[in-house]
Image: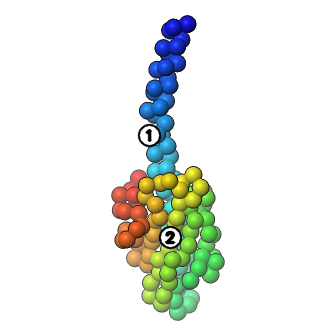
């Protein structure tokens, strides 16, 4: 019986150490969902701009879903003008606690400025 209790204690300790690391890995892997959504938004904005005099003002206007493909991020157009736009992907649900926060893309590519996700968050 004592041996069984020792084994249970060891498993509990290993679980307590491994679980936070596993959760961090899962959040990191879900960042690809934000990137996929933002690159789709960027392509849709360029298609919209090719047929109009400015970039689209909303995801509905350019025909992009308001959520990322896997549903871990909310996608929006933060700003748009004749020659520029900023699209964002804000974490939601179980991804809301991610340290990288909101990802952004503009007409030149990933946007690392201000409160948006840093460049190292875009790496896998």
Quadrant including the N terminus: top right
Q: Which residue shows up at 51% across the image and 89% down it?
A: 54
Q: Badge 2: few (under 14), some or many (20 or more) residues near its Cα, within 10 Å?
A: many
Front-most of residues 50 and 83: 83
- Give how far across and how far down residue 52 sits, in percent: 56, 90
Task: Look at the numbered discs 2 and 1 and tell me whether their residues touch, using CB distance below 8 Å.
Answer: no
- Give how far across and how far down residue 14 sits, in percent: 45, 27
Q: Which mark is residue 88?
A: 2
Residue 48 shows in this picture: no
Q: Which residue shows up at 37% across the image and 62% down it?
A: 118
Mark 1 lies on residue: 21
Q: Residue furthest top?
A: 1
Identify the colour scheme used.
rainbow
Front-most of residues 60 and 90: 90
- Seen in the image, is 121 located left or right of residue 8? left
Q: Which residue shows up at 63% across the image and 69% down it?
A: 65
Q: Secondary structure at mark 2?
A: strand
Residue 9 shows in this picture: yes
Q: Earlier in the sequence, mark 2 or mark 1?
A: 1
Residue 117 figure quarter: bottom left
Q: Which residue shows up at 62% across the image and 69% down it?
A: 66
- Seen in the image, is 4 located left or right of residue 100? right
Q: What count of labels does the image hold?
A: 2
Q: Is residue 118 above or below residue 52?
A: above
Q: CA distance from mark 2 to mark 1?
A: 27 Å
- Give how far across and how far down residue 61 sits, in percent: 62, 81
Q: Badge 1: few (under 14), some or many (20 or more) residues near its Cα, within 10 Å?
A: few
Q: Is residue 111 above or below residue 84?
A: above
- Give how far across and how far down residue 31 sits, in percent: 48, 56
């Amino acid at each position: 019986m004592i041996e069984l209790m020792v084994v249970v204690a060891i498993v509990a300790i290993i679980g307590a150490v491994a679980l936070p690391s596993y959760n961090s890995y899962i959040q990191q892997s879900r960042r690809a969902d934000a990137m996929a959504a933002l690159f789709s938004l960027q392509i849709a904005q360029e298609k919209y701009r090719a047929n109009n005099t400015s970039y689209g003002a909303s995801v509905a206007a350019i025909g992009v879903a308001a959520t990322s493909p896997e549903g871990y991020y909310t996608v929006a157009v933060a700003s748009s003008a004749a020659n520029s736009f900023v699209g964002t992907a804000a974490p939601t649900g179980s991804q809301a606690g991610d340290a990288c926060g909101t990802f952004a893309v503009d007409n030149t590519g990933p946007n690392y400025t201000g409160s948006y996700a840093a460049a190292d968050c875009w790496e896998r």
